[in-house]
Amino acid sequence: MAEKKGKLIIISAPSGTGKSTIIGELTKDESLKLEFSISATTRQPRRGEQDGVNYYFMTVEQFKAAIAGGEFAEYEEVYPGRYYGTLKREIERINGDGRNVILDIDVKGGVNVKRMYGDEALSIFIAPPSIATLKARLEGRATDSAEEIAKRVAKAEFELTFADKFDHRVVNDDLATAVEQTRSLIKQFIN
Ligand code: 5GP
C-alpha cells in the first residue's frame, strides 16, 4: 500500500541483523546526505527508545486514523496487530531539505516501495550469516522476551526468502565490512 514520491534508499533485513547499527553509521556520513525516515508504529517503545527519534509511537486507533486520513506512503502489519508505516510528511520533510531518504522497513514494504519507485530507489537486503547467529544476537540484545525472540526467528526464516527481490544483498558477518559494502552501494547510486 503506497504512493510514489522522491528518491530513496531502502534497507530491509530480518530483525537482529544489525540493520539499525548499519543505518546509524551511514547517517553519520555527511557525504551521503542521508536522513532517516522516522516510521510510525503501534508497538511499545523498547528501553532507550524515544518518541519522535526512533519511531512515532501511536495507539492502534491513532494509526488507523492516519491510514484513513491517507497519511502513509506505505504501511504493513509486520506482526499480528502491530502496524508500522512510513508517513508521507516524513519523506516530504527530508526531500524538501534536499537530502536522501533512508528507510528501515520490513521486507514486504521494501519490495513494494522498490516496485513503486523503480530507478529512483535503491533496495538493499541485509542478511545474517545464518539463522543460528541471528538467534544468538537477539538473545544477546536482551530487549525482547523469549516468546518474542522465537517469533522473530520464525519470521526471519520467511523474510530471508525475499532477499533475491532486492537490488543488492549484503551479509552482515563483520559489521565494519557490511557498513563499507553498504556505503559503497549507496555512493554509486547517488553519484
Ligand atoms: P522493530 O520492531 O524491530 O523496530 O521493527 C520490526 C520491523 O518493522 C523491522 O523489519 C522494520 O524494518 C520494520 N519497519 C519499521 N518501520 C517500518 C515502516 O515504516 N514500514 C514497514 N513496512 N516496515 C517497517
Image (cartoon, rainbow, N blue to C red):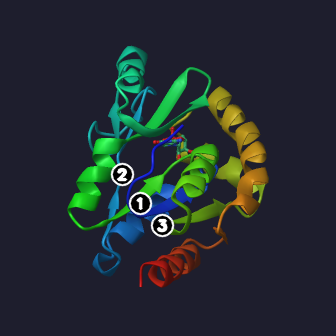
Q: Is mark 3 within 8 Å of ligand 1?
A: no
For the residue marked with disc 1, what is the amino acid? Ile
Q: Residue at x 79, y 52 (%)?
A: 161
Q: Position of residue 5 (x, y in %)?
A: 39, 54
Q: What is the crowding at mark 2: few (fewer than 14 residues within 10 Å), some, or many (at least 20)?
A: many
Residue 145 lies, with reference to residue 28, above or below; the image says above
Q: Which comes before the other along the chain, label 1 or label 3?
A: 1
Residue 174 lies, with reference to residue 52, above or below; the image says below
Residue lying at the far top of the rendered structure: 61
For the residue marked with disc 3, what is the amino acid? Glu
Q: Which comes before the other along the chain, label 1 or label 2?
A: 2
Q: Nearer the viewer, mark 3 or mark 2?
A: 3
Q: Position of residue 27 (x, y in %)?
A: 35, 67
Q: Secondary structure at mark 1?
A: strand
Please tell me which residue lies in front, 6 or 53: 6
Q: Is mark 1 within 8 Å of ligand 1?
A: no
Q: Could you give the CA–CA distance between mark 3 and mark 2, rounded to whole angstroms?
A: 16 Å
Q: Secondary structure at mark 3?
A: helix
Q: Which comes before the other along the chain, label 3 or label 2?
A: 2
Q: Residue at x 60, y 48 (%)?
A: 112
* Res 62 visible: yes
Q: Which residue is mark 1?
A: 102
Q: Which residue is mark 3?
A: 120
Q: Which residue is mark 2?
A: 37
Contact check, label 1 and label 2, Cβ < 8 Å: yes
Q: Is mark 2 within 8 Å of ligand 1?
A: yes
Q: Position of residue 110 (x, y in %)?
A: 58, 52
